[in-house]
Amino acid sequence: MGHRLFSSYDEALEWIHSLLRFGQRPGLERMNWMLEQLSHPERRLSFVHVAGTNGKGSTCAMLSQVLREANYSVGMFTSPYLLDFRERIRYNNEMISEEDLLALANQIKPLVDRCCAETEYGSPTEFEVITVMALLYFAHVARPAVVIWETGLGGRLDSTNVVHPLVSVITNVGTDHADVLGPTIADIAREKAGIIKQGVPVVAGETGTEALAEIERIAQEKRATLYQLGRDFHVQTERIEGLEGQSFRYRSCHRRGESEYLLHLPGLHQLKNAAVALMVLDLLRQFFAYLIEEEEISSGLQQTRWPGRLEVVAKHPLILLDGAHNREGMTALVQSVSALLPEEARLHVLIAALADKPLADMAAAWKQLDSRLERVYVTSFEFHRAAPPSMLTDAFLTAGMTADRVTEAPDWRSLLRHWQHETKHRDDVFIVCGSLYFIAQVRSFFPIPIEEAGE
């Protein structure tokens, strides 16, 4: 079968995005077929495989930064991206080059055509192609010592679940993607625990009884030692310094004593993510002879940044961006705002979300701050799954907010300009949230330095 080579990065990227028309098709048949044709590049690599409803990206970022501080070369595969598609595949915090991505697309395109023509599996999806691309890049081009490997959706049937990692991680279990993963917490936990491999240790940041029962059951079936937050490792807040960060104490079954660390990622939920990352590092040190000093852990955590998570993009007035895009994420955002911002702060929220999210549940999370909320602005953005403003209005009204406090804002850019230039009250704080895809578009609106980032 003939194939014309892509002549530019943009042309290759257009082809990758064209595969979106095949949608989400859980299953590993296409992945296994392609990897077999490529002589299994994944077998050349060491992985830490990270699943979970929320916190995957932040946990991956902490692991990567600490390992880099310890002079290990690190690959990282995450999704989605904020500003540049190449953020999804990184080596030592640097995005894959356009030249390497172009070369990989030209290598994989004939394989995709063959999979479609020669097998009963049909065409690989966009995410499957990106996953194979990352494996080829890490195995044959970058060759990192370890790959921090984030799942896309779920775990058991996710495209990333073709690797045999050193450690498996489940950050938490929430109700996101219930239409794909199952209607109950137990169903979703079962899917996420599908990344657990025979004899491979598992770190779980989840503390809910129902989800933990499923994770424990599958870990026992696979004879995989399970390390649970609150049982085998512990985290406790020491000091919160507003949006500047927080210090905390950590201990685990693989440490003689307690350690104190400083984290510049704001948000109470980030302490759980940090604890999960630290437990993974403890296992790498204990069982896989990784040489990671305390100073390197401390420095790595302090240097970790993850854009789009309680990120300050303007200070006068204060404007925060957060990628909270489901019930659990929105609850965590509200709790952090309540704890980190002064009582006198007058809160204005701009929200856009995907239509297939639990919008009423997301809206209900804000009732905790009802007395401090000045107004909620609902909008939409350029994305095929984006909810119209009217749907978000209905969600907030269903959640009990009065109609006079919910405003539809068809042009969010004009609203942001108004906030930036017309705000007079020094206690006004503006929060933009609802979807990482929306945050990506909002973030490009602000003249801030581009940092590499990684629903």
Image (tube, rainbow, N blue to C red):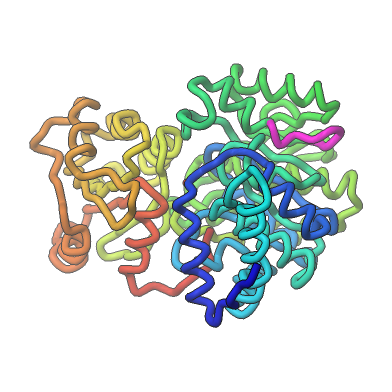
The answer to whether residue 15 of the structure is visible from this angle is yes
At x 58%, y 51%, the residue is 123
Number of callouts in the render? 0
At x 63%, y 72%, the residue is 2
Give, as a single range, the part of the protein colored magenta. 194-201
Left/right of residue 282 with respect to residue 123 in the rendered view: right
Closer-to-camera residue (420/343): 420
Closer-to-camera residue (259/180): 180
Dividing the picture into quarters, in which one does residue 161 lie?
top right
Q: Where is residue 226 in the image (x, y as percent from the top left)?
A: 77, 29
Closer-to-camera residue (20/159): 20
Q: Is residue 198 magenta?
A: yes
Left/right of residue 135 with respect to residue 343 in the rendered view: right
At x 61%, y 60%, the residue is 113
At x 68%, y 33%, the residue is 204
Q: Is residue 13 magenta?
A: no
Left/right of residue 201 with respect to residue 402 in the rendered view: right
The answer to whether residue 62 of the structure is visible from this angle is no
Q: Position of residue 242 (x, y in %)?
A: 43, 51
